[in-house]
């Protein structure tokens, strides 16, 4: 009997929570740029009874992502692919944000779109920040959605000089992710698979805490306090959403984004919060 393979790229708080949620009965392939974090996650999940294989990956390298996709296919039917790897504005400068958060997503969508099994599904972790981006022209939208990954960062709209800071590059990349997922829905669909994205709000992970501790932390807390949920999210909130989008209840959903932010975006965009 061919086994079900669940791939989780990025083994931080959200990645581990998702692996636990979808890993039962599957062969879990974990990947991360940090071998220390990867080994810790693999040891933890193995100790909880999951069948785990770990492989380092650099999502900015096609060769590295292609090797990960080939490893996944060698283990069995690639039925679930979850891409959580990313950098936040407080972690990296503009070039690294664009390389990891934009190019990395594009490479994962392309390489795993070639190996995902019929009936399989993928989830890309984007961000509510993408919903605050001012938007693109129709031409920019088309190019960001469909330009081959290897040429993506050469687009004029991706020029480093066009970003005031890492925050603007981050919201740009996360908004572009939604376009890449929408376009990938067609190519993944040719294999009988689906792909969607999740846009989390502020989540209680080390990355989320770093944002709350930054110069923007006070305004972020005001948004949270004014939101419907009035709390930060948990990795379990995102894991439950990923499980739904990857599972049988979501077989009519593809190429879309699910905003999981406790109502923060609604609060800001409707003018509830001055």
Image: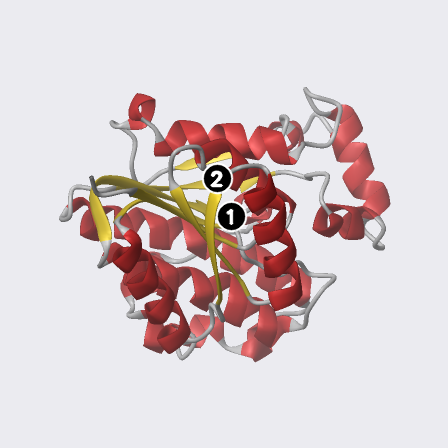
Residue at 38%, 72% in the rendered image? 152
Look at the image and tell me whether residue 269 can be seen. Answer: no
Q: Relative to 143, is 117 above or below? A: above
- The residue positioned 36% from the left and 38% from the top of the image is 256
Q: Which comes before the other along the chain, label 1 or label 2? A: 1
Q: Which residue is mark 1?
A: 126
Q: Position of residue 93 (x, y in %)?
A: 67, 72
- Spot the residue most to the left: 190
Q: Is residue 102 left or right of residue 137?
A: right
Name which quarter of the figure residue 107 lies in. Answer: bottom left
When the figure is inspected, residue 112 is found, relative to residue 164, above or below; the finding is: above
Q: Is residue 170 visible?
A: yes
Which quarter shows the C terminus?
top right
Q: Residue tagged by mark 2?
A: 198
Task: Assign a secondary structure to mark 1.
Answer: loop
Residue at figure coordinates x 59%, y 64% from the top left: 169
Name the residue: 20% across, 53% down: 187
For the residues bearing labels 1 and 2, Cβ distance under 8 angstroms: yes
Q: Is residue 13 left or right of residue 100?
A: right
| x, y percent for residue 183 | 27, 52
Residue closer to the observer: 17 or 147: 17
Quarter of the image with the N terminus in it: top left
Query: Is residue 104 found left or right of 89 in the rendered image?
Result: left
Q: Nearer the viewer, residue 183 or 265?
A: 183
- Coloured how? secondary structure
Q: Could you say where residue 137 lies in the image, as x and y percent from the top left? A: 39, 58
- Answer few, some or many: residues within 10 Å of disc 1's Cα (few below 14, many 20 plus, some between 14 and 19): many
């Amino acid at each position: 009997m061919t086994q079900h393979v669940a791939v989780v790229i990025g083994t931080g708080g959200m990645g581990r929570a998702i692996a636990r949620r979808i890993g039962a009965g599957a062969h879990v392939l974990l990947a991360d740029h940090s071998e220390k974090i990867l080994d810790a996650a693999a040891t933890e999940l193995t100790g909880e009874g999951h069948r785990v294989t770990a492989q380092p990956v650099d999502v900015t390298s096609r060769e590295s992502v292609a090797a990960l996709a080939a490893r996944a296919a060698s283990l069995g039917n690639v039925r679930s692919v979850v891409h959580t790897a990313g950098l936040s504005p407080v972690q990296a400068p503009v070039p690294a944000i664009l390389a990891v958060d934009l190019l990395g997503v594009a490479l994962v969508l392309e390489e795993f779109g070639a190996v995902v099994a019929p009936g399989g599904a993928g989830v890309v972790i984007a961000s509510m920040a993408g919903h605050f981006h001012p938007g693109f022209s129709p031409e920019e939208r088309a190019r960001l959605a469909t330009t081959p990954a290897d040429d993506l960062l050469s687009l004029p709209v991706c020029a480093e000089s066009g970003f005031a800071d890492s925050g603007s590059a981050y919201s740009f990349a996360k908004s572009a992710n939604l376009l890449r997922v929408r376009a990938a829905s067609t190519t993944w669909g040719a294999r009988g698979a689906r792909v969607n994205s999740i846009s989390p709000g502020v989540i209680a992970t080390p990355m989320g805490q770093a944002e709350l501790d930054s110069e923007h932390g006070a305004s972020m807390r005001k948004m949270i306090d004014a939101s419907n949920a009035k709390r930060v999210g948990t990795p379990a909130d995102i894991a439950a959403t990923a499980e739904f989008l990857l599972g049988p209840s979501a077989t009519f959903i593809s190429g879309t984004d699910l905003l999981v932010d406790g109502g923060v975006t609604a609060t800001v965009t409707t003018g509830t919060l001055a």
